[in-house]
Image (spheres, helix red, strand yellow):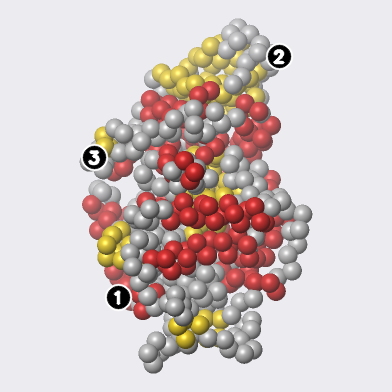
Amino acid sequence: MHVDGDSRWTLDVADAGHGTDYGFSLDGGRPLPDPRSPWQPAGVHAPSRVFDTSRHAWQDGGWRGRSALGGVFYELHIGTYTPQGTLDAAASRLDHLVELGVDVVEVMPVAAFDGRWGWGYDGVDLYAVHEPYGGPAALQRFVDACHRRGLAVCLDVVYNHVGPSGNYLGEFGPYFTGGHTTPWGDAANLDDEGCEHVRRWIVDNALRWFADFHLDALRLDAVHALVDDSPRHLLAQLSDESAALSARLGRPLSLVAESDLNDPRMIEPTSAGGLGMTAQWSDDLHHALHAWLTGETQGYYVDFGSVEDVARTLTRVFRHSGGYSTFRGRTWGRPVDPARHRGHRFLGYLQDHDQVGNRARGDRISASVSVGRQAVGAALSMASAFTPMIFMGEEWAASTPWRFFTDFPDPALGAAVREGRRSEFARYGWNVADVRDPQDSATRDASVLDWTELGTQPHARVLAWYRALTALRRDAPDLQADDLREVRVETGPDRLTMRRGGLDVHVNIGPSAQQFPAPAAAEVLLAWGRVEIAEGVLVLPPDSVAIVRRGASSGAAS
């Protein structure tokens, strides 16, 4: 190969078309996979293979895309969504999502990683698609199938670190820097010598998913670990280049950040000094709902648990917005300005992969509370001013857990992951005996959704509730609005009322029935529990919720 003046090494090889295997030998060493490898059919330690993205005959010519803002997200993991654990098998279940009322399918990471099973956050070949999932061609088929059904697709990508097995990047150049550290070690080199090529490697990856795989959105994992002291932050660069590509393609492209910073600068435009993200996840809403509904206040839930915390996050997004965070031991966050920051810029959810899978037993909220309380949490997140998200199986209160699992072939690495997991949970006071061996195939198998549950109770009733919530959100203009200044929340012991325009969401999680005022012309649109309304009073039994339209013709709850 030959190097040019910009430190790029190139070589033209005749007839090295689609399906050609290749590798790079550094100074006579064994061939290594390409840092931009598009296909790793034999695993992350084997040669790369050329993949021609233009070979796919796209069937989504009528697809004009959709913004991530305000759509119902559905987070799924390819390896456990079906027993087969493939993209093609997941595509066979897409009609379920259409019936549920989903707008955006968020797929957890598919970048190639070592072993067959894993969450996907240990990817090492970021341009490739994990071969056990079906490889890159299967991802194109999956996106095509989604678009034919009117579903947008968001892909979870990880740029803050790469996995421990199959990571050869450091041998090719300064992809990492010791100038910053992250929970995974040295940080991605975004501001040190040679960083311009690393930044290009990341941004080009994102643009490739949009252009060559027709993705509609990217979810950027843990962007607080993208430490960048350069004048122009990587996220701002990615935002501007994605916007330019969006203009060329003629369809919206969205960037959704996972951030622990509680800083609205994340979603502010780059022209105003922001980082330009379309939206960001809101863990504080999850923590507030989870702690209030379950009573758990250990670990990072320590500052949550009251109904007032729920009210604050529903109206001002962040529980920590410049005040003291007990868990972090310092002040944290910046306040959201409802006059500038719209609710749809934040994703709200009752569950997600982290908040289930990073529990000792991987247990869902339905294992801790009544189905009524889960219905309450779903109603508050779905009827909020945020962009709502559902974690796979949540919609029918799946009885299957979702645990942390890996499949590293290296026994020493597997043992290190196993012991590290147990030590981490021990520090937070969990029972170590509850922590299943991540390397045991039974841990993954137990996490696979059981689709036979949909026709049994209470799962069918919960599924009907989620479908009704998505339908009401789509049909009610008051629930489509996202002006946080118009969200009003009133609280009392074990009770809450959220007002959205002409709609009220009344909640009772107390041990006995509670009364709520209701105008004479009020109409109950949706209710969980035997709700009664008469003579200006709405009566909710324990663990119940009712969504009421004020000023409508008189009606009764079914």
- Check residue 412 in the rendering and tell me which mark sits there, or answer none: 1
> Which residue is tagged 3?
330
Q: Horizontal placement of 553 versus 518: left or right?
A: right
Quadrant where the C terminus is found in the figure: top right
Relative height, residue 173 to residue 320 (above, below): below
Distance CA(mark 3)–CA(mark 2): 52 Å
Identify residue type, mark 1: Ala
Relative height, residue 260 to residue 116 (above, below): above
Identify residue type, mark 3: Arg
Earlier along the polypeptide chain: callout 3 or callout 2? 3
* Labels 1, 3: front one: 3
Earlier along the polypeptide chain: callout 2 or callout 1? 1
Q: Residues within 10 Å of mark 2 (few under 14, many from 20)?
A: few
Distance CA(mark 1)–CA(mark 3): 37 Å
- State the residue at coordinates (31%, 34%): 322
Callout 1: helix, strand or loop? helix
- State the residue at coordinates (54%, 37%): 344
Callout 2: helix, strand or loop? loop
Earlier along the polypeptide chain: callout 1 or callout 3? 3
Identify residue type, mark 2: Ser
Please count the marks in the image.
Answer: 3
Relative height, residue 505 to residue 418 (above, below): above
What x and y, as percent, mark residue 224?
37, 51
Q: Residue furthest front?
A: 5
* Labels 3, 2: front one: 3
Residue toward you, 456 or 195: 195
Distance CA(mark 2)–CA(mark 1): 68 Å
Q: Quadrant of residue 524?
A: top right
What x and y, as percent, mark residue 173?
37, 75
- State the residue at coordinates (58%, 41%): 69
What x and y, as percent, mark residue 75?
54, 51
> Which residue is tagged 2?
553
